[in-house]
Image (cartoon, rainbow, N blue to C red):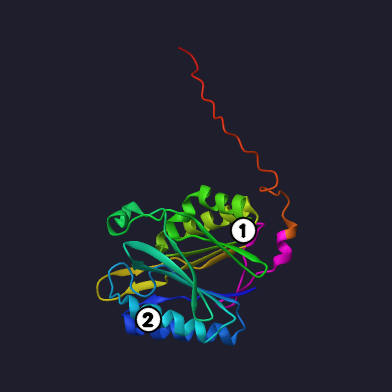
Amino acid sequence: MRVYLPRFFVAALPENLARMEADVAEAASLDCEMIVFPEMFLTGYHGQSELPLMHRAFAEASASCPGMLCVFGAVSEERRNRLWVYLAGDAVTHYDKVHLFRPNGEHTMWQAGQRYCALEWGLWRIGLMTCNDVRFSEQARALKLRHDINLLVCPALWPWERDDVWATLLRARAIENGLFAVGCCVAGVDNGKERFDGAGNHVFDPLGDTVRTAGRLYELDPAILDAVLVDTRAQHVDIGEVDCVKAGG
């Protein structure tokens, strides 16, 4: 599968919408089957938000390339940090971020999501996460055990100074679950209300190797899924008891 990950700089909403449309058009011209936009890519934390306009733009951009799955990072909606997936102009599903990032006060801005989310598309079973969710291995593990996902998609608004942590967590989720992990991060924010330097985009294969690219297009080879040495889903042991003993007096 050919996946397009833009390096998205968040400015004013009209400029962001125009850039989104241009990225979708470029991805379609490269015969991509998926495009992933980062978390809060149209507004940042505090920029202008016009939900009807934004959803109309999502539908129109998706309709312009009906064969490409569009993952629109996240928007602030109904007091949730909400990721949307569109195909051929229609919303397929949405996912509300479960693990809000407390150091930035996200728990005061949004309510936490109450469900994990996966979708099937062709050969791919795709698990959805947003940013800080990637720290919680149990989320990826639940998606793997219950739905046998082979691709994890994680939009983010992650800081550049912790890019190594971001990449390490994505790589870990790929290795421990034998899947492709795709992380798409905001490149930067300067919308008149906040300034932010974002981390990089990273893609890892099921062996933990970096999927390299000369640009923004990444090719995922499903044959690598068969090269995983340990099938951690098939060999999973469900242990209900966790013992803790007290040593000494």
Q: Nearer the viewer, mark 2 or mark 1?
A: 1
Range shown magenta: 205-225
As drawn, the residue found furthest toward the top would be 249
Magenta segment, prevailing SS (helix, strand or loop): loop
Residue type for callout 1: Ile
Relative horizontal placement of residue 230, taking residue 13 as reference (left or right): right
Quadrant (top left, top right, bottom left, bottom right) of the C terminus: top left
The residue under label 1 is: 149
| Disc number for residue 191 | none
Relative horizontal placement of residue 178, taking residue 171 as reference (left or right): right
Residue 214 appears at what percent x and percent y?
59, 77
Q: Helix or strand or loop: what does disc 2 sit on? A: helix
On screen, 243 above or below 98?
above
In front here: 83 or 187? 83
On screen, 79 above or below 139?
below
* Quarter residue 238 falls in: top right
The residue under label 2 is: 16
Name the residue at 40% across, 60% down: 161
Q: Helix or strand or loop: what does disc 1 sit on? A: loop
Mark 2 crowdedness (10 Å alpha carbons): few <14, some 14-19, many ≥20: some
